[in-house]
């Protein structure tokens, strides 16, 4: 049975009349899993209905956010859903609906294909996270992981017992954020850094994306690591 999972109201086609935007889908019996997720827009001026199928149309907790991501004073549509997998991956799309014409501005698949990384363990408890796309290297100290963890992969002199590479997961979350407080939102993208296995989290790559008139491009990028409790 097709039901509505989220609902928002705002001008997304640029005529200054609020439109109705909602997500529909079929809920799986006895499960929060949703299939056939569809973006539906009702033109506030004439009640015309537009249905926009999503490339990935199944997941958990489908939600909407309306905000101006391009600076044209018209609201755009952020569609988000969880994959439900152990890696914590999420699916996200940003659509423009200016003049009742749907145009995709952000596709999580394109993001995952574009941003490539290497994660390489080094001697003396260091790990390099290399952003191939941005030609940038981040070096983190993993001594916070504790002696039990470190002794499995390092000799007592700090040398690696064998070469180890990790990886950066696909998009973990995507948040709208107005960095410059000017009413135009940026996208705050987060990807989890995995070490020897997926549950061996080393930190996160955080990329802020800004619309340049044609596409979202990196505005800033950071690597964040976990802290360690200070012993008393």
Image (tube, rainbow, N blue to C red):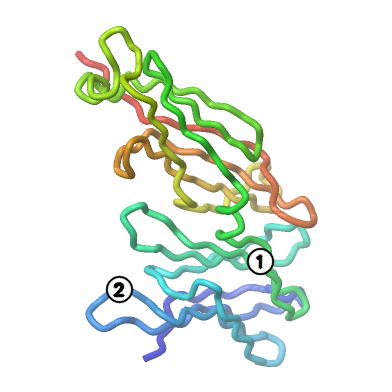
Q: Is residue 107 shown above or below 145?
A: below
The residue at 37%/77% (across/down) is 34
- The image quarter containing residue 78 is bottom right
Residue at numbered disc 2: 32
149 relative position to 186: left or right: left
Q: Secondary structure at mark 2?
A: loop
The residue at 34%/59% (across/down) is 85
- The image quarter containing residue 161 is top left
The residue at 55%/75% (across/down) is 54
User: x, y (%) of residue 171?
Assistant: 49, 52
* 65 and 16: which is toward the camera: 65
Q: How many marks?
A: 2
User: x, y (%) of residue 152?
Assistant: 23, 24
* 34 and 43: which is toward the camera: 34
Q: Is residue 216 shown above or below 58?
A: above
Residue at numbered disc 1: 76
Q: Is the Cβ of the residue at disc 2 closer than 8 Å to that at disc 1?
A: no
How many angstroms separate mark 2 from mark 1 (CA)? 27 Å
Packing grade of label 2 (10 A; few <14, some 14-19, many >=20) is few
Q: Residue furthest top?
A: 157
User: x, y (%) of residue 158?
Assistant: 33, 11
Query: Comparing marks 2 and 1, which lies closer to the viewer?
Result: 2
Q: Secondary structure at mark 1?
A: strand
* 49 and 200: which is toward the camera: 200
* Quarter of the rendering occupied by the C terminus: top left
* Quarter of the rendering occupied by the N terminus: bottom left
Q: Is residue 60 shown above or below 222?
A: below
């Amino acid at each position: 049975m097709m039901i509505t999972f989220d609902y928002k109201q705002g001008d997304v086609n640029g005529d200054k009349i609020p439109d109705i935007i909602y997500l529909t889908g079929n809920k799986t019996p006895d499960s929060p899993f949703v299939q056939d997720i569809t973006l539906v827009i009702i033109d506030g001026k004439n009640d015309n209905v537009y249905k926009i199928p999503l490339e990935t149309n199944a997941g958990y907790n489908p939600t909407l956010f309306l905000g101006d991501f391009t600076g044209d004073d018209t609201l755009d549509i952020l569609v988000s859903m969880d994959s439900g997998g152990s890696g914590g991956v999420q699916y996200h799309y940003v659509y423009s609906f200016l003049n009742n014409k749907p145009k995709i501005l952000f596709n999580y698949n394109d993001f995952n294909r574009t941003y490539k990384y290497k994660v390489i363990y080094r001697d003396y408890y260091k790990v390099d996270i290399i952003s191939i796309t941005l030609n940038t290297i981040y070096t983190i100290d993993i001594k916070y992981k504790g002696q039990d963890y470190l002794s499995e992969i390092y000799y007592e002199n700090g040398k690696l017992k064998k070469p180890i590479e990790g990886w950066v997961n696909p998009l973990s979350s995507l948040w709208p954020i107005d960095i410059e407080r000017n009413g135009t939102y940026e996208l705050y993208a987060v990807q989890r850094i995995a070490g020897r296995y997926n549950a061996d989290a080393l930190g996160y790559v955080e990329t802020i994306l800004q619309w340049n008139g044609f596409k979202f491009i990196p505005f800033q990028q950071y690597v964040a690591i976990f802290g360690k409790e200070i012993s008393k």
